Image (cartoon, rainbow, N blue to C red):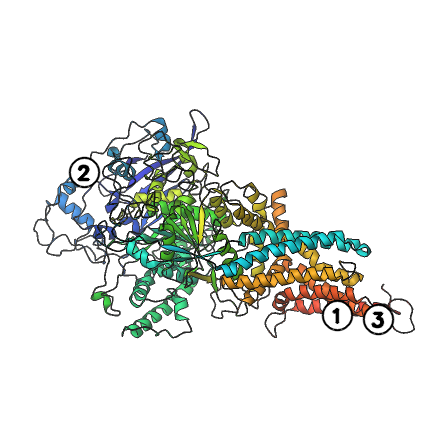
Amino acid sequence: MASESHLTKGSSRVRHITQISNDLNGEHGSVEYALYTVHVPPTPDNQPMEISMQRSTSKRVEDQYASSSFFTGGTNCVTHAHLKDQVIESDSNHPQTTGAKGSSCAVPGCDAKVMTDERGLDILPCECDYKICRDCYRDALRTGEGICPGCKEPYKEPDVSEAAMVNQQPQNLTSTAGLSKMERKLSLMKSTKSGALVSSQTNEFDQAQWLYETKGSYGYGNAMWPKDSGNKNSDWLGGDPQIFHDKQWRPLTRKLNIRSAVLGPYRLLIFVRMVILALFLKWRIENPNTDAIWLWGMSVVCEIWFAFSYLIDQLPKLCPINRTADLEVLRQKFETPNPSNPTRKSDLPGIDIFVSTVDPYKEPPLVTANTILSILAADYPIEKLACYVSDDGGELVTFEAMAEAASFANLWVPFCRKHNIEPRNPETYFNQKRDPYKNKVRSDFVRDRRRVKREYDEFKVRINGLPDSIRRRSDAYNAREEIKAMKLQRENGNDDPIENLKIPKATWMANETLWPGTWTMSAPEHSGGDHASIIQVLLKPPSDEPLKGTAAESRAMDLTEVDIRLPMLVYVSREKRPGYDHNKKAGAMNALVRASAILSNGPFILDLDCDHYIYNSEALREGMCFMMDSGGDRICYVQFPQRFEGIDPSDRYANHNTVFFDVNMRALDGIQGPVYVGTGCLFRRTALYGFDPPRFKEGAGCCDCFSAKCKKASTVACAPDVSHGQDQSVKMGDNDDEEINLALIPKKFGNSSLLVDSIRIAEFQGRPLADHPSVKYGRPPGSLTLSRNLPDASTVAEAINVVSCWYEDKTEWGQQVGWIYGSVTEDVVTGYRMHNRGWRSIFCVTKRDAFRGTAPINLTNQLHQVLRWATGSVENFFSRNNALLSSSRMKLLQRIAYLNVGIYPFTSFFLIVYCFLPALSLFSGEFIVQTLQVTFLAYLLGITLTLILLAALEIKWSGIELEEWWRNEQFWLIGGTSAHLAAVVQGLLKVIAGIEISSTLTSKSAGDDEFSNLHIIKWTSLMIPPITIMLTNLIGIAVAVSRTIYSTIPRWSSLLGGVFFSFWVLAHLYPFAKGLLGRKGRTPTVVYVWSGLLAITISLLWVAVNPQSGYTQIGGSFQFP
């Protein structure tokens, strides 16, 4: 709880809060205190027991102070809420945008702003339309006998509740002073003076207590709780269960099986090839090459490993499937008027979308801004969307770019809705090469498009000019501060030289205040690894009613029939301090999970990289079809395939990765689901919290996570009711069936009671609709159509608390809760943990690509990215996340798939040896077999033919092209001989010696030349093994051909075998060699060096092999020094 000191009227309130960390191992427990202070300026919503103007719900939505304040805080520092009249230098007039204020107050001497409604229009309490601000209106009611300063007539009398607020009479809320020891341990905060503090003492409204005592609504979308809680045997939480029985029930999704004419032969060929491989290996072992036993031994070992690798790669492909979603059924069920939803409001659950970025110089803010604009314009209920931008670098450039994007969204989003624009990324839309006017029937489309295009060009100029603008602004303000300091020094009579003045080179915001994040010139508490927490609501949460444009707003664009509301947009930069392990992207995502649970609590979370934008505006609806269908409550996430733009037409380095997404992922979807690949994934929030899936055991209810016994009233949300302190237990973790007492909830999630309370709400809102008997644990129709409660200033201050760097101490965040720490591939580990608990996932391939992004198209960046992926796989193999240690809840073929994910980098050892074998065979004149027997050639032909047939059938059922399959084969060898070997070495160093691995952030291109990066060659040590393999095989071919031609008894069989396998290696390395050549006419110097060495080496070997006539010694008269 919190202790609070009330100051004089109109002054600020200071809340001294102590966050506790419980060590529950002992009988009495030890408590660690971390003191911080929340400074909340006087605003309408931080004075809940004072006067509240009479206005509609939609008006109250728009004047929340929390949406116009800039919140900062952290460890051992004050949490401030700074009121921001201006966030960026450009003007913004949308009512939801931060800083959008009303007219000036007409009371003499007052410079405050009049409150505004959802359209940004002034709220005037008197019929004479006298403009008065909130504080002056309050003073007029208290001290002016309710007389309007304009017309001198009394204001209308407020209702009883408002009168009570004016007189500062606290409401009679239930006292919580008699909390037990266990309840005090579970509370969010403790007073530093007198323990728990009741609501009546603080005059603050306890939302959690009100929720569970009155069965009210809470959170994003507002679940409707039952009025009669006595019927514990009912699976319904309100509403009429018969409303859907009059019409035929239709599923939201369908499973499309692969045609048996294709899948049957495909499975048969897999087993046929396995049999051939087994017989081939048996023959190879039984027929050694006695002339070159070392060559035979190395080849047999490599071939055995390749057969094993092929086995674990091919077995999970036995059950590929396709799926489709029916958006029309989704609209009928959730957005069509019915007895439980007569208002036609959307009954879909909320979605919180996470966008993460770190370095604005490697991830251009313009790219991130376009991603944000595509999210804000998505075709999903506006009031159910919330977008969170994680700026892990704490850069002012990123913050102002997001504010600019929020301002431009005022024009871009209504334009997209009016003309049904696709895609809704402005950069992609305006750069399309097809006719933009095709299928556009509105007469004003051309005019609107030209205007938006002009505004977007100006928007790009502002975004790209932000670094220079911030630098010039900061230089001017820093010069002003230096002048002030010199003036103050002279006034104080200080004789120290002016050069001794040390004025920090700070970074300044547009409103002439210091930026609390990372400065351009790093300083203590203002660097990339040392800065405070920052939260800014850039776009206020919208009202729940559609808001059409007015005639005054439509002078440039007719928006009278367009909903101009915008989804909620929040900027978050978590606290970073020296000495803390911030766990890179996984830590940033967990901070967003906690902050979003406090502010919006969407039951579903969509994770996007900053360069992956929404290409299909209905993609969120398609993903929700799977979550809301029968059995959808057992789905932990829906993974969308990654599609990329800006890749060269030949896809030289297999950047599209279509074999992985369209073959492997479709096949895994037929088992237990695809792996999580780091972006484009729609999560169930409760699955991220580490809970088990519902109904895993027969008769178990809900998530099987907070109730050890099977209770019939299992449709209640699965999080514990903290306010009642009942003796409940939870089941969490990785299948150890450990019953954890309710007191361990803070040890799992931390000491934020708002966060813990939100879990039950998120679980309930994420349930499928109970419109069919097959939906056993659903929610009633119409339960998510109520208006939601908006976060106030104290709620945002609590969000600052949960993104502090110390919050995760002594909790399970990163261990069992949220994104999992300890690996550079946190995405694979996080998905593995969910599958290991029994959840399943879905692979959603939409007709129109759901998301699109960028990929590194030059050789160096691609190798570094492959290195990071492979290194994470090695780490996972040597950790508790090894598939060999998985639980019985994971299916067998799913285990094999995860085992393959952890093992594939080790193939590099055998692959490199096998690529050198042809050259060694050519040098030595021997081959891996004694002679080219018919049996050997027959086995080789059988293996090759089955490989070709399998590839043809994979192309048939997956829809990929032959060229894509071949590019994947080529880069498999390129990556296996370069990045995979380095990954194994790095992984072993970390496991054995504890040497941490530094991952390289992939740069995102924002240039005009889409293929400009393709020909950039940056030398890296990863290129040495493949270059050596190429040169060795080329030299080996030259030496073998020369020897055979000039040999008395030529051995053509050995030559043909060695040359065939050498060409096989060189054909796979062709894209690598082409990449080394760079752009035509710009061959790098390193290529000339290697070419010269190659020519010299071949020449010397030629002299040695073919001496001049008249000389008997090898090499003629030439002798090595």
First in sequence: mark 3 vs mark 2 = 2
Badge number at residue 1095: 1
Per the model, the C-alpha gap separating discs 2 and 1 is 93 Å
Q: Place residue 460 in its image quadrant.
A: bottom left
- Residue tagged 3: 1046
Frontmost residue, 809 versus 247 = 247
Frontmost residue, 949 versus 172 = 949
In the image, residue 551 above or below residue 211: below
Query: Which mark is in front, 3 or 2?
Result: 3
Characterize the local packing of mark 1: few (<14), some (14-19) or many (20 or more) Cα atoms within 10 angstroms: few
First in sequence: mark 1 vs mark 3 = 3
What amino acid type is highlighted by mark number 2? Gln
User: Residue 890 at x, y = what percent?
Assistant: 50, 44
User: Residue 736 at x, y = what percent?
Assistant: 48, 35
The residue positioned farthest toward the top in the image shown: 27
What amino acid type is highlighted by mark number 1? Ala
Per the model, the C-alpha gap separating discs 3 and 2 is 108 Å
Frontmost residue, 799 versus 757 = 757
What amino acid type is highlighted by mark number 3? Tyr
In the image, residue 469 above or below residue 806: below
Q: Is residue 97 visible?
A: no
Helix, strand or loop at label 1? It is helix
Helix, strand or loop at label 3? It is helix
Helix, strand or loop at label 2? It is loop
- Residue tagged 2: 168
First in sequence: mark 2 vs mark 1 = 2
User: Residue 474 at x, y = what percent?
Assistant: 41, 58
Badge number at residue 730: none
* Contact? badges 1 and 3 (CB < 8 Å): no
Q: Count the marks: how many?
A: 3
